[in-house]
Image: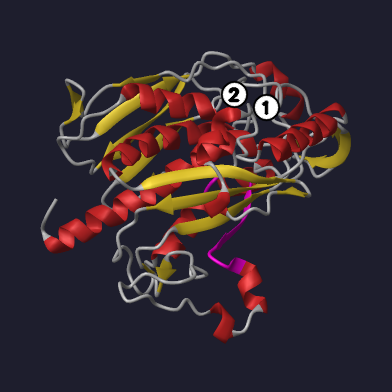
Amino acid sequence: MAGNTFGKLFKLTTFGESHGVAIGGIIDGCPAGIPLDFEAIQQDMRRRKPGQSKIVTQRKEADEVEFYSGIFEGVTTGTPIGFVIHNTNQKSKDYSHIKDVYRPSHADYTYDKKYGVRDYRGGGRSSARETACRVVAGAIAKQMLGEIKINAFTSAVGTIQLNTPYQDLDFSKIESNVIRCPDTDLAEQMITRINEVKKQGDTVGGVITCVIQNVPAGLGEPVFDKLHAELGKAMLSINAVKGFEYGSGFEGSKMLGSAHNDKFNADGTTQTNLSGGVQGGISNGMDIYFNVAFKPVATTLQKQNTINSEGKTVEMQGKGRHDPCVVPRAVPIVEAMAALVIADYQLLRRQESKTW
């Protein structure tokens, strides 16, 4: 299986399955001399881990990270950082009923067609549990980035949408509720909606908005390796993501060029930021902001028709512990993937200038 590594200079390779002994990763290219705040890393893991509230899956995992290399006395050494997260609460029997059944909108069918074998226990390698490894690497990347700040938050659950410009939001309120929405009143509506669909045995999707601030101008490449293209790839690599837009996004297609253009100030900043902090594939020093759309979780507790490995129509019903909405736990994943992209481009730029 190819495609387990992300990044060019700051590279993350992950391994492991949802119901295996452990998952883990190797971070290659992290510079030496970075003091690490291990509690900050673990805090991001707590934000992603299952069982953290009643509106997410009730699988109980401590998700404690064990580092095996690349760190000495709390400081990175410049060598590969190896880490492991042990799986402690697998219930593989919850998946025995789908051993030979393809769940709709899951990777079951495509895995079988591509590899001729699949780990049906929680989806194996296709499980979102793999994203815990991304959060570890992203937490380290954040500490490498210094003044660059990355904040993601829930901006929609189903049709309930936050329309307040991010500039008018208080990011300190993101962690004040289990849905991770900085508008506390709207957060309650979102939580109520998730509980409603959960009682129906159904699921609901949503949107996460991410804002990256204090990014210097000059990150990115003008052709195939555009900064926003790499951010799009990073986000679309996350399980359940169906859409990515940055800056004015699809709404910008409805505007006239005269209204959409970001007029310059004398210092090179712009009076508006419909470009989303990126022009010509290169950061312009303004805030980078984007939206990531997540589909409803494919596993529902309602009965539905599907096919089995013999091509016969069968009836199936989801069992076990599943998220009624993936969005609350995906917020730190979006931040992590954004951090990996920015860290990679920072290293590429410093390599070009031969400075660190």
Q: Residue at x 81, y 42 (%)?
A: 307
Q: Nearer the viewer, residue 155 or 44?
A: 155
Q: Nearer the viewer, residue 125 or 300?
A: 300
219 horizontally vs 122: left or right: left
Q: Position of residue 133 (x, y in %)?
A: 43, 33
Residue type at the position of mark 2: Pro
Would you name the residue on which mark 2 appears?
50
Q: Residue at x 78, y 49 (%)?
A: 159
322 horizontally vs 355: left or right: right
Element at badge 2?
loop
Q: Position of residue 215 (x, y in %)?
A: 34, 56
Q: Which residues are magenta?
A: 237-249
Mark 2 Cα-neighbour bin, 10 Å: few <14, some 14–19, many ≥20? many
Mark 1 Cα-neighbour bin, 10 Å: few <14, some 14–19, many ≥20? many
Q: Nearer the viewer, residue 284 or 171?
A: 171
Check contact, mark 1 vs mark 2: CB within 8 A: yes
Would you name the residue on which mark 1 appears?
56
**Colour scheme:** secondary structure
Q: Residue at x 47, y 20 (%)?
A: 63
Q: Is residue 242 above or below residue 272?
A: above
Q: Position of residue 332 (x, y in %)?
A: 50, 37
First in sequence, mark 1 or 2: give its number: 2
Give residue 24's quadrant in the image.
top left
| Number of marks present in the image shown | 2
Q: Is residue 145 above or below residue 253?
A: above
Instruction: Specify whether residue 126 is in view.
Output: no
On whether residue 248 falls in the magenta region, the answer is: yes
